[in-house]
């Protein structure tokens, strides 16, 4: 099985490294100093599940160098979905499966519009980590789930093959009977976690500990869940409760990766979190007063960071 990792950051680097060390033919598509470091020194991962060093590593900036892949783990930022989707076309054969792992609920449809919906399998990654320096990924907790499946809920041969490969690599694949429920289950909490930790410039612990901001967090999640129920009418009744339990169990020092990007003066995924809550709410006639405020409050900064990135 040839596996291409498009966007070898924290998530792609971690899963790709595990797969490479398990003996799979893995290619990493990256750029800049991170790519240079991988090509020179290999890819290092510090993890509570076992440190790794992949060297030599198959890493390139050009997807055409990879050739046709069986699986593409598509782990670029939301803002790059369309442009990266065009770039991966040389890696696509008739049976190639492309697994999306972006935050939010719209990336899989946006990518399908570029490369063909038949290639796309939506996924949800639950794994904390960051690129702490070029060529080095720090995985900060044992959680390393990759949840995915076909959009119609059928467990295809290609989904089964990837699940088996990930199990062999020692990570935690989960084939969901309804990937739309998984996407919205994460989105209800992630959209709020990202906006609040970025706006408040603090970890989730203090936000949960303050009664007023704790209530704001829960109300904003309830708002996102109402939008989700309009989009996916069979969303489980316990979606909100499970999402809040997840938030309650987060380490106090946890914050969204959007805050890390903000602090590094990188573009933030604002449009695809609270922004999508607002837009999808308007489309389906669901009021979103809290997310409208969160979206508006972050918009000037988000626009400046986007303009600076070019």
Image: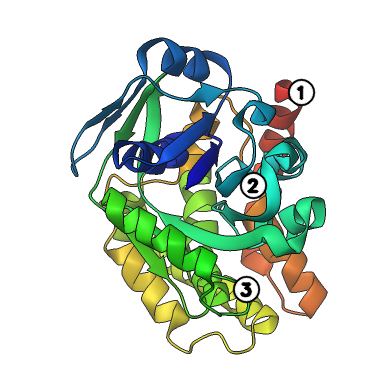
Percent of width and height locating residue 236: 49, 87
Residue displayed at 63% across by 57% down: 274
Q: Nearer the viewer, residue 33 or 68?
A: 68
Q: Nearer the viewer, residue 273 or 86?
A: 86
Sequence order check, earlier mark of 3 and 1: 3
- Residues at discs 3 and 1 in contact (Cβ within 8 Å): no
| Residue neighbourhood size for the residue with mark 1, other residues' Cα within 10 Å, grouped as few (<14), some (14–19), many (≥20) | few
| Residue neighbourhood size for the residue with mark 3, other residues' Cα within 10 Å, grouped as few (<14), some (14–19), many (≥20) | some
Residue displayed at 56% across by 80% down: 153
* Disc assigned to residue 37: none
Sequence order check, earlier mark of 2 and 3: 3
Find numbered disc 1 in the image and state the secondary structure of the residue it sits on. loop
Query: Colour scheme of this structure image?
Result: rainbow
User: Residues under labels 1 and 2: Cα distance?
Assistant: 17 Å
User: Residues under labels 3 and 1: Cα distance?
Assistant: 34 Å
- Residues at discs 1 and 2 in contact (Cβ within 8 Å): no
Q: Nearer the viewer, residue 201 or 58?
A: 58
Q: Nearer the viewer's eye, disc 2 or disc 3?
A: 3
35 in relation to 255, above or below: above
Pick out the residue farthest to the top.
40
Find numbered disc 3 in the image and state the secondary structure of the residue it sits on. loop
The residue pinned by badge 3 equals 151
* Residue 278: quarter of image: bottom right
**Would residue 106 appear left or right of 149 to someone viewing this image?**
right
Sequence order check, earlier mark of 1 and 2: 2
The residue pinned by badge 1 equals 310
Q: Nearer the viewer's eye, disc 1 or disc 2?
A: 1
């Amino acid at each position: 099985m040839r596996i291409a990792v498009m966007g070898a950051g924290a998530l792609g680097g971690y899963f790709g490294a595990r797969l490479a060390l398990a003996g799979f033919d893995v290619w990493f598509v990256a750029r800049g100093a991170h790519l240079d470091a991988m090509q020179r020194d290999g890819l290092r991962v510090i993890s509570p599940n076992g440190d790794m060093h992949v060297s030599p590593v198959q890493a390139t900036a050009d997807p055409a160098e990879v050739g046709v892949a069986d699986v593409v783990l598509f782990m670029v930022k939301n803002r790059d979905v369309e442009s990266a989707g065009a770039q991966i076309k040389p890696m696509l054969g008739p049976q190639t499966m492309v697994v999306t792992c972006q935050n939010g609920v719209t990336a899989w449809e946006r990518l399908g519009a570029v490369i063909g919906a038949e290639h796309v399998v939506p996924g949800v990654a639950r794994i904390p980590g960051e690129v702490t320096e070029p060529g080095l990924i720090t995985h900060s907790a044992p959680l390393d789930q990759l949840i995915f499946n076909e959009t119609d809920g059928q467990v295809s041969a290609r989904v089964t093959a990837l699940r088996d490969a990930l199990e062999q690599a020692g990570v935690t694949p989960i084939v969901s009977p309804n990937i739309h429920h998984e996407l919205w289950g994460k989105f209800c909490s992630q959209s709020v976690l990202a906006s609040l930790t970025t706006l408040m410039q603090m970890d989730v612990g203090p936000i949960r500990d303050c009664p007023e901001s704790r209530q704001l967090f829960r109300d904003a999640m309830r708002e996102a869940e109402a939008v989700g129920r309009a989009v996916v009418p069979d969303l489980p009744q316990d979606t909100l409760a499970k999402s809040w339990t997840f938030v309650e169990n987060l380490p106090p020092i946890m914050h969204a990766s959007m805050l890390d990007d903000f602090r590094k003066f990188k573009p933030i995924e604002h449009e695809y979190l609270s922004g999508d809550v607002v837009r999808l709410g308007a489309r389906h006639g669901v009021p979103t007063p809290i997310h409208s405020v969160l979206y508006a409050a972050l918009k000037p900064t988000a626009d400046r960071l986007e303009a600076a990135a070019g």
